Amino acid sequence: MMLEASQLQSATVLSTQLCIVGAGPAGISLALQFIGSGIDVILIAGGKAGHDEAAQALYAGEVADDALHSPLTEYRHRQLGGSSATWGGRCMPFDPIDFERRDFIAGSGWPIGHDDVAPYYPEANVLAEAGDFQYDAKKAVEGGMRPIAEGFNPVSFDNDRIERFSCPTDFGSRYRHRLAHAANIRVLLDAHAVEIRAGGEKVEAIVLRTLDGKEITVAAERHVIATGGIETARLLLASRSEAHPAGIGNAGDQVGRNYLCHIAGTYGELAFAPGTPVFHGYDRAWDGVYCRRRMALRPEIQREHGVGNVVMRLHHPRLPDPAHGRGILSAIYLAKPFISYEYSKRLHGGDAMTPGHVLRHGFNILREPFGVAGFLLNWVKVRTLAARKFPSLIVAPRNNRFTLDIHAEQVPNLDSRVTLGAGLDIFGKPQARVDWRYKPKDIETVRVALELLRRDAAATGRASLDFDPEGVAEAMLRDGAYGGHHIGTARMGPNPDTGVVDRECRVFGTDNLYVSGSAIFPTSSQANPTLTIVAFSLRLAAHLKREFLPKRSEIRTSAIKGAAA
């Protein structure tokens, strides 16, 4: 069943066994596991089935440094499906080293290992519509994927690691009908969680408000918060009471701390020897899924040099510089005002359009009018109209010289945090305040990886890498915190002094409240978080089913005894 919360009477109390707050990839993946289970579930979507400006405005808040973090209304979508409404679809699992305690990275180490989540990745791949769970370039495509470049095998990096791409799947539109027709699932749209009501260690209810002023309460045996890294911290901190004066789960002052994203950007120039065949695009698996190689810093090299996890991909020249001479790159640059914030910021950074630049870009377009027109027509076919969309812009440079698209782990930082701000939303609740910070180790990881690639490229005799070590920080921080990867604000830990949830995602200090999503990740890995978010939701679903099982068995036993009498 699917209904709008505004259709209910104010002061309505809904009872259920499992209440899931948040209907993005985490919440929807979790709810899907209970279809036909006999367990009654309410899934709360803080928005409508599609975009709604009034609901979206509830994400407004404060940012400590606008140069380092996007406005809080960007990259997050308050609607059914959450931020999957605009994600890019990039999928890859976390690596075993990500779960380890690494002496060279303060705050690293999960209370579980990679083996604890690995069994849930294949089904996560299915839900994300990313095809088979196969991330080895030699096996992902029949006959193996094409190499990045002939004879180019930098020894410090694994070139056989790949990323796979979802359609990209909007979890709201893709799974809406399955949820709506499930007899034991109620989806409550446009219901905004404003408080977790807890007495002692037991959460009694979730308080919801509607935009037309109604208050609704959901009382459940177990509750899961799956509202994203920023909103999860905000809701836990704002739910204060005599039993939880600093907010729920915050006895150790950990809620909102260690706010992570990724360190990302384009930098350097990797030049291949003339005549070297180079492929930096996508191969397709048997089911049409797009797959792409990347260069991943090997775990033993990370340990040897004491740096974080990092991957690199070949990338076209930076768009704002008209010296690239490519008409299509200039056309996209000039189309910046018409491209969504999420993508225009990544494509162009903070570069301003000057008249001189516009003229030079215009000249590039005039030099290649047919090439530009052909590219745009093909783009409409493979991106705009296709059900499974071509993942990204691929333009080969004329001179076999590529920039590097870098995606690196950010290390935990207690001072990088989400807190409650001074502003109030329309319900009178404190807005979030984000103060994202980085550490020297974050920049060192990228610098060391580039130094190693420069050495390894020269050793192959097929390529050379040119970059300025002094410019790494500026390049990696040009766009600040990377996009919508909001990680670590309710991290998993062994105790409430170092974490917010335990190994089963249960909030410390409560016996029936859980968190699902990237907020629980202690470290960020090199990987985009969505696939691992879904995998952890599946793991949590399995745990909750085990918790519900004794009670269901009790009920069945009582029913049998009653029938016999």
Image: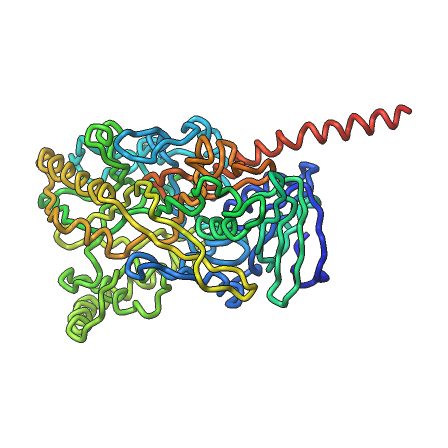
477 w.r.t. 284: above or below: below
In the figure, is residue 544 to the left or right of 312? right
Tell how many labels: 0
Q: Residue at x 61, y 45 (%)?
A: 198
In the figure, is residue 331 to the left or right of 242? left
Given residues 408 and 501, the one toward you in this image is 501
Residue 276 image position (x, y, % from top left): 13, 42
Residue 10 image position (x, y, % from top left): 70, 62
The colour mode here is rainbow
Given residues 148 and 47, the one toward you in this image is 47
Which residue reaches farthest bottom?
Answer: 355
267 w.r.t. 146: above or below: below
Q: Residue at x 35, y 36 (%)?
A: 141
The quarter holding residue 491 reads top left
Which residue reaches farthest right?
Answer: 565
Residue 513 image position (x, y, % from top left): 58, 40
26 w.r.t. 7: above or below: above
Residue 86 image position (x, y, % from top left): 43, 56
Q: Residue at x 42, y 45 (%)?
A: 489
Residue 132 visible in this rendered orientation of the protein:
no
Given residues 469 and 186, the one toward you in this image is 469
Residue 126 visible in this rendered orientation of the protein:
yes
412 w.r.t. 430: above or below: above
Q: Residue at x 60, y 34 (%)?
A: 544
- Quadrant occupied by the C terminus: top right
